[in-house]
Amino acid sequence: MSELGNEPNQNESNPAGAGTENRATPPAAAESKRVSRARVLGMAVAAIVVVVGLYVINRRWIALAPATLRQAQAKSNSNHPLAPGFTLTDIFGNRLSLSDYKGKVVMLDFWATWCGPCRIEIPGFVELQSRYRDQGFTIIGISLDDSAEPVMEFYKQFNMNYPVAVGNDSLGALYGGIFGMPTTFMIGRDGRVYSKHVGATHVDVFEEEVKMLIAAKPSDEVSEQIKAESNPEVPGVDISHLSAEQLAQFKKELGSQQCTCGCNLNLLKCRHDDRACAVSRRAAHEILKKEYAGSQHI
């Protein structure tokens, strides 16, 4: 009885043992699984490398393609408008005028201390200024803060090394309006706007453009156009050869004639309020040529 009683116990343990043996993975199968997992992992890593590589190439193309295109377009100045001139007082009380940087590459940055993307960009701008300042490049920061106090504090905190002034909506309007910050314009040696960036942009993109624009040289013709565009008396018209009396008479005549562009302003007022107006510009040139063509100052 006792032996018979022990047999069921052995039989109960045997099936368990047999089940364990059946569930155990043979060495060859285990090795096959490991190889399969390694292959899947390798394929995943390869896919990640490809994706990252394509991303880097795409970023590089985004940076280089526009610069290359602009370099080709630079031969035709009509593709790029002249940057509107302005004069402000910087945060240290010094005069800051765009015309003072004629012949240089200028990166004009509209920003604010409370703008998160602006704060991200500025350390890179500080590096660009240090790297290319001696090659004819400068950054001009136009803060759209309400006052200079927070700008001064920010300037010191971020070790900014380029001129900064507090701007206003009127200045922004000259550049087509600032509808998002940061908004950055790249201005070539010839005083023309070659690109506009709205929102945070990688510093590598700016650097490629800076190097391309530094390599360009302004022509005499364009320099004259810059002079005409930036003069505060009659914007967009070369008045450098007029005497003081002639200039006063010229302005008086412009003030007496209505602009026909639909602005309901006289020609002089339209030139000041809308420098892009081709109607007032053409009319001013015609008056200048007609009335002062025989002058020794023309």
Image: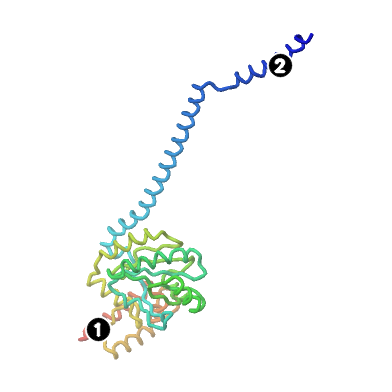
Q: What distance separates the C-alpha of mark 1 from that of mark 2? A: 116 Å
Mark 2 secondary-structure assignment: helix
| Residue 282 numbered mark, or none | none
Query: What is the x, y in percent for residue 118?
Result: 47, 66
The answer to whether 30 is drawn above or below residue 179 in the figure is: above
Q: Amino acid at mark 2?
A: Glu
| Residue 241 numbered mark, or none | 1
Which comes before the other along the chain, label 1 or label 2?
A: 2
Mark 1 secondary-structure assignment: loop
Query: In the image, what residue occupies the spot 40% across and 79% down?
Result: 272
Side of 10 where 287 appears, left or right: left
Depth check, front residue: 180 or 293: 180
The answer to whether 128 is drawn above or below residue 63 in the figure is: below
Query: In the image, what residue occupies the spot 43% across and 80% down?
Result: 91
Q: Amino acid at mark 1?
A: His
Please state which of the two labelled residues, at mark 1 or mark 2, is closer to the viewer.
2
